[in-house]
Image (cartoon, rainbow, N blue to C red):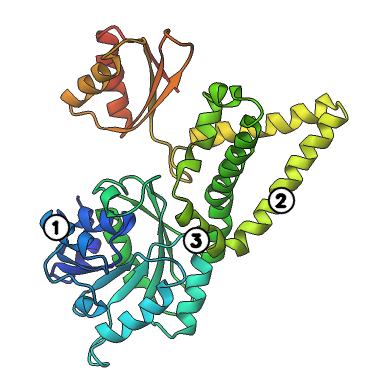
Amino acid sequence: MEFAEHEKNLILNKKLVIGIAGLGLIGGSIAWAFKSSDLVEKVIVYERTTKNLAKAIELGVITSESGCELECLRDCDVIFICQPVDIVPFTAAKLAAITSLDGKRRGAMLTDVGSAKSEIMDKVKELGVARFIGGHPMAGSEKVGFGAASPTLLENAIYVVCAGDSYDYSEDVELLELLIKDLGAIPVRMQAPAHDRVVAVISHLPHMLASALCTYAAGESEHDEMVKVLAAGGFKDITRIASSNPDMWTEIALDSRAALLPVMSNFVNEVERLIKAIEAKDSEAICAILEAGRVFRNEVAMSGRGILQGLPEIRVDVSDKPGEIGKVTSLLGENNINIQNINIQHTRAYEGGTMRLTLQNERDMTRARELLVSEGFACHEK
């Protein structure tokens, strides 16, 4: 990708040696994305699962210098620690010592990818790690492990950067943000407490609620099998994330409990407010609550990916017959129009539905609409 001149100067006229501690979904995706980077000389990985190491080396994602001991990361310039939150600070302390070569040189710049930042930042500071920047790529998958890794996982995702206020991080932060851009992600600076509070609301709470809704529905289905039969449409949409790995989300719930518990309590209060309005047959109160929810949801939909400027969308009506979706994607692909995201909204069975396509820019949206209309598709902008 193209970089500004001041960003190029941060590379110090040499390619970087990137280290990764942990070759799971995020670590594997970062390693894979850096494989084709012009900024990176090589990627070295610390991973205790030899099967993952062997597969990554076979695919050419990492070098054979990778290994099962942290010492393999000794000569790295930047190291991404892709491990559980409770392990990150201790790995950071070990790496700070290993990469400083007994104090003879400045240690590697260290960063992590955990979803709970305050706990990590506080512990890292307590352990005296002087060159650490918290990070959280806002991307993932229902699947886990290196087998689910992808070089495009972080493309267009928000990547939060949390630099503490105790050190002069200016150059390191700029370097990390440069690498984040190189991954295809979008760096956003936040303080750790603010990050944890916001992520608890928009990520951790929804996961807990989706799972709770599914367990409740499962209990109801024991009495009436039709609960499963009719559990489609909106129910599937709002509970999709309940398919995520339960072990991983148990860790996340415990790691983020300081921010998550108050948020969950406040949500319970909001549900109780709605219950009381329904009990009282207070139509005005019910409508006000639903209207406030509708307005907020529409504002989120219009703002694209989180706090960023929204990406353009186009909606395409498709009939319910084989090959229709393929026609749309093939037509755009053949004309070099990159589809950032696809969402299919069904209407009635056998009558088709709507494809919601998120595109890269306004130019692509205009061109896509022209091409699709010329082929007989009905198109609507959001």
Q: Residues within 10 Å of mark 2 (few under 14, many from 20)?
A: few
Q: Nearer the viewer, residue 86 or 217?
A: 217
The residue that label 2 is drawn on is 266
The residue that label 3 is drawn on is 251
Res. 166 visible in picture: no
Residue 23 higher or lower than 287, as above or below: below
Residue 349 higher or lower than 100, as above or below: above
SS for dot 2 = helix
Q: What residue is rendered at 27% in x and 77% in y?
A: 108
Q: Nearer the viewer, mark 1 or mark 3?
A: 3
Q: What residue is rendered at 25% in x and 23% in y?
A: 329
Mark 1–mark 3 distance (CA, rounded to whole Å) = 35 Å
Q: Residues within 10 Å of mark 3 (few under 14, many from 20)?
A: some
Q: Residues within 10 Å of mark 1 (few under 14, many from 20)?
A: few
User: Residue flagged by tag 3: what amino acid is it?
Assistant: Glu
Q: Earlier in the sequence, mark 1 or mark 3?
A: 1
Q: What residue is rendered at 51% in x and 30% in y?
A: 236
